[in-house]
Amino acid sequence: MPKVLILHVGFHKSGTSALQETFASQREQLQAAGVLYPSIGRKAHHRIAWALTQKAWGWKKRGGEVTSFKHFTRMSRSINGSKSSKIVLSSEFFSELTPEKIQAIASSIKNREVKVLFTLRPLTKLLGSSYQQYLKYGIKADYVEWLHSVLDEPGVSKINPTFWQRHMHGDVVARWVEVFGKDNVTVLIADEQRPEFLFESLNKYLGLDSGFLKPQVTGSNRSLSLEEVSLLLELNRRFPKERQWNEYLVFIRDGYIRQLTDHVPLKEGSKRLLTPGWAVAKANELATASKIKIQQLGVEVYGDINSLDTATVPEGEPEYSSTIDIETVAQAMLGFDRKLSNRVPFRWLVEWTTGEVIRRLKWAIKSILPGR
């Protein structure tokens, strides 16, 4: 049996986090079944993808981190030296790779077949969740402004250029087919009416027993309510320009907001972010072009490909809230994770430590002076 490397390369907002949660939680069971899901200290393999893209994680000019290329070279050496028959790497950021970087993967992997797996949701259904994800990155545009930035001129966005690197789905699949061939590329289309379909299909794809991989319940990563969207948008607009990415990451993105999405259930009756009808129509129109391209490529498809351009979402004009429930704010503020202190900017520690040492020295000197 030939050795295989399976690259789960995206797409963003297509159930990737849920799959990665399962891969990580069932790592030992997978290994016993002959499937290695390497551990690099995280549930997914984003650092491997970031090492290839060489894009900063965070705000490039305000403390964003560029991942060293050595993360990729180490992983490729480890894969080439592994005796495991199947190895799985998973990161939706692989979907942003250029043809040259995809070829770099092909050139680096020796004596092992490479299979490429995409998970995909209709473009219409990922607009709102994509906006929320970029909102957690600090953008200051409201939803309608953001929709115009990505849909008025498809392929271009001044606010978030990476959107179309990720979501021109037919073109992205074509890049991987060009390097690895259509017989080695599979597209799995998620079905929201059948949540179990994603895992059933993945078990079949990996040659595992039905029911082997199953959803985990350790983190929800739910969508934000309209109130919460309004709160985060206001935080972004007020966040001082002189403050750094790590400060935003620690206190806003991975602090208050992650506490809400992972640990605080959505309040009953909460309003949701609505998508204008014109954006739904435009997204389905663009999805038709991607659907046709995927069909023409001849890759294997799991699921209903015709669902890609017939999707519906709740339509309407978003009306932002100027108030938020005090209980929601309290739960967010109480959720700070002490482990996040490891990411506090070094200059903060230096400034605080230096000032505190000087203050204590002055107090000690005064306490021993004559007459004190």
Image (tube, rainbow, N blue to C red):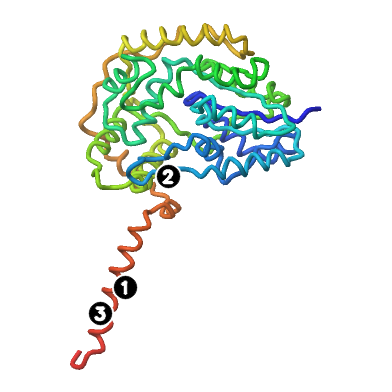
Label pair 2/1, CB-CB below 8 angstroms: no
Q: Which of 351 and 26 is in front in this view?
A: 351
The one of 95 and 365 positioned closer to us in this rendering: 95
Q: Earlier in the sequence, mark 3 or mark 1?
A: 1
Give the image location of residue 13, x and y in percent: 47, 25
Please identify the quadrant where the C terminus is shown.
bottom left
The three-letter amino acid code for the residue at tag 3 is: Trp
Tag 2: amino acid = Glu
Q: Which residue is drawn at 26% across and 22% down?
A: 145
Residue 66 image point, x, y percent: 45, 43
Please state which amino acid type lies under the numbered disc 1: Val
Marks 3 and 1: which is nearer the front? 1
Instruction: Choose between 12 and 227: the one closer to the eye.
Output: 12
**Separation of residues labelled 2 and 3 (CA atoms):** 40 Å
Residue marked by disc 2: 65
Q: Badge 1 local density, few (<14 within 10 Å), some, or many (20+)?
A: few
User: Neighbour class for label 2 at 10 Å: few (<14), some, many (≥20)?
Assistant: some
Residue at point 68%, 39% (across, down): 79
Label 1 belongs to which residue? 357
Is residue 8 found left or right of 79 in the rendered image?
Answer: left
Q: Which of marks 2 and 3 is nearer the N terminus?
A: 2
Check residue 363 in the rendering and tell me which mark sits there, or answer none: 3
